Image (tube, grey):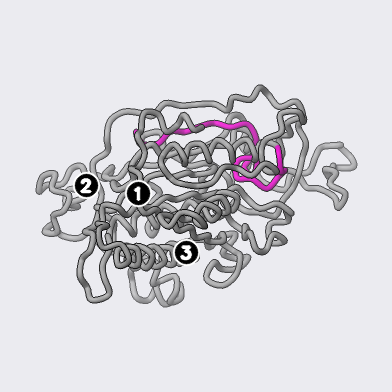
Amino acid sequence: MQDAAGGSAGMAAGKFVFYAAMDGTNNDKDNLNLSGSSLQTNVANLYNQAKAAEENNPNIVARYYPGIGTGGQTGNILNAGLFPTGPAVATAEKAYADFRKEALDYLDTHPSATPSDIVLSIATFSRGNASGVDLAWLVNDRGLVAADGTVIAPPGSIKIMGMVMMDPVHRFVDGNVIESSLPPNVVGPVLVVRALDESRSDFRVLDYGDDPRVVPIDSAGNHCDVGGGNDRNGLGALNLEGMTGYLQAMGVPIADVPADKRFDPSQPVAVHSEVYQTAANGNIVTNIETGESLLKWRVDEGPRQSVPVKPPGETHFPTDPRSVDAVNGSDLESEHAPPRPRAPWRHPAHRQRLGPAHAAARRRPRRRRQHRAAGRPGRGRCPLPDAAVRQCHFRGSGP
């Protein structure tokens, strides 16, 4: 995976890096019982590596954000299921506030530094990707503004370099509030690691194949074999090593993977499944009459299913200045075109039914878009052969 950085030179030495780690649904490194696993995810592992580097490097600040459904602003069991949008927005807003504070503090304490020295790096797992992409858009749209209103860095000027998406899933995330596409301030290559052996219908992976900045890597295993948490030294560890190499190649100064969390090639490789109902002892529950294994989730037949992501600007509203067919030309910054008709959820009565928190999330301004770029990224596969061992394992983490 470190090869995903390709010929990119990465960021220059001396850059200030704000590293944001966005965990998946029901995943909190400080409350592992929520996920039903005794192991934390690779988002948390990478965060720990960034924190280890932070101890001896003043140019990196790492922050960890628990996933949807872990309590507080991240919501509860309902948000972990059908209503993830509000908590995803809240997490992105908190991360932006943290980034803004740390970036301004760095500039205040380093008189010779300029806004061009500020870089953001993001790692996400599952629906934590909604918060990560939303954070990228917030930085793109807002830039960096001081407390007195002075514009320190205009919109679009702060770059995001070193972005890892672990099996990104946006199930039930409202696309009218959080875009799946990446903003123009994201500098490629962006690494997306996709689980080849995930078949659950509610875990269809986002397909960024039309964005030339994105390099997808197909890895053996299911959702949590990529995101981590199934075993300590198996596929999750192999993916952790690859993602660490990619971030380091991009110039993100994180520490190496600790020895106790590295892949062990001497052990059989287990590809896990969370599709079936399991008993307390871990055995798959079967139908007494037919002997068929009982499903816990809806599943897709055939190869892994995906959800295509339209690149920024792939709309066709002639009055939208962000559209590829804008009547006022290709000036993406124009504010003179008439606005689109109000969507149903913008009606005050509908906002009241949704509640104030959700309505606030939906009042977010539309993002600026840019025309799609031509080309497709190269595609890769996990270097492992077919797994020698396949076993079933259920965890309580959601999409």
- Please provide the residue range marked out in magenta: 211-233
State how far apart marks 2 and 3 are (Cα): 29 Å
Q: Position of residue 230 (x, y in %)?
A: 71, 45
Task: Specify few, some or many for label 1: CA neighbours under 10 Å numbering under 14, 14-19, or 20 or more.
Answer: few
The one of 40 and 47 positioned closer to us in this rendering: 47
Work out whether 61 lies above or below 394: below
State how far apart marks 3 and 1 are (Cα): 28 Å
Report the residue marked by disc 3. Answer: 91
Direction from residue 339 to residue 200 in the image, left or right: right
- At horizontal 81% and vertical 48% (from top left) the residue drawn is 278
Query: Which badge, 2 or 1, is on the more N-terminal residue?
Result: 1
Q: Position of residue 365 (x, y in %)?
A: 29, 63
Q: Position of residue 397 (x, y in %)?
A: 65, 54
One can see residue 141 in this view: yes
- At horizontal 54% and vertical 46% (from top left) the residue drawn is 255
- Name which residue type carries label 3: Thr
- At horizontal 71% and vertical 33% (from top left) the residue drawn is 264
Q: Considering the numbered disc 1 on the image, is that residue within a helix, a strand or a loop?
A: loop
Query: Which badge, 3 or 1, is on the more N-terminal residue?
Result: 1
Direction from residue 244 to residue 222 in the image, left or right: right
Query: Which badge, 2 or 3, is on the more N-terminal residue?
Result: 3
Report the residue marked by disc 2. Answer: 323
Work out whether 60 lies above or below 352: above
Report the residue marked by disc 1. Answer: 14
Numbered disc in front, either 2 or 3 = 3
Q: Position of residue 165 (x, y in %)?
A: 49, 44
Task: Specify few, some or many for label 2: CA neighbours under 10 Å numbering under 14, 14-19, or 20 or more.
Answer: many
- Name which residue type carries label 1: Gly
